[in-house]
Amino acid sequence: MNILLLAGQLAGRRACAQAGTGPAASTLATTGEKHLRNVRQLTNLNAASFAPSFYPDGKRIIFAPNLGSTGGTVNFELYAINVDGTGLEQITFSEGFDGFPMLSPDGTQLVWISHRNGKAQRETNVFLADWVP
């Protein structure tokens, strides 16, 4: 499944969202068009891209795709991309799941959830790290 990362404006403020392909995506896009303006596709990675969140300065988006996962593995990593769709950068490098990233309002810390260091299969923990751009 290819899930796309979209960016636009909602009520005059920047917004980002995810949308799938197929009938469900058509419904989402039709509903979203009533509220979103200047919507543009940022990714087409042939991967599930979800949990987008803006950097505090609004110039980049951090999100979690399963880019490069093969053979049914669920290896989601954190990536960042510029709001114009350029500059894709991998942030985390671990086996398993990293997702739901958010930067602190001042941009100095990153919080996300991960299966890393779990004592049981698929145990999910919250991680907080200092963010050094």
Image (cartoon, rainbow, N blue to C red):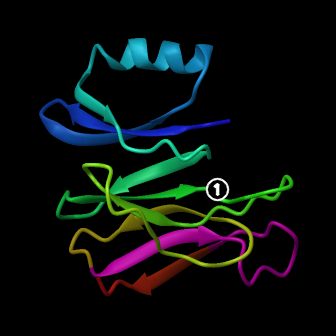
**Count of all numbered marks drawn on residues in the image:** 1
Q: Main secondary structure of the magenta part?
A: loop
Verify whether residue 111 appears in magenta. Answer: yes
Q: Position of residue 120 (x, y in %)?
A: 87, 75
- Horizontal relation, residue 40 to residue 121: left or right: left
The residue that appears at 36% across and 20% down in the rendered structure is 32
| Residue 67 or residue 106, whichever sits in front | 67
The residue sitting at 47% across, 19% down in the picture is 28
Q: Which residue is mark 1?
A: 66
Q: Is residue 75 left or right of residue 102?
A: right
Q: Quadrant of the N terminus?
A: top right
- The answer to whether residue 29 is above or below residue 99 is above
Q: Give the magenta range.
A: 108-125
Residue at 59% x, 68% y is 113
Q: Residue 22 in the image: x percent, y percent?
A: 61, 18
Q: Is residue 124 above or below residue 19?
A: below
Residue under the image location 71 percent in, 79 percent down: 116
Q: Quadrant of residue 64?
A: bottom right
Badge 1: residue crowd in 10 Å (few <14, some 14–19, many ≥20): many
Residue 12 in the image: above or below residue 82: above
Outermost residue on the left side: it is 12
Residue 132, quarter of picture: bottom left
SS at mark 1 in the image: loop
* Front residue of 43 and 118: 43
Percent of width and height locating residue 76? 64, 61
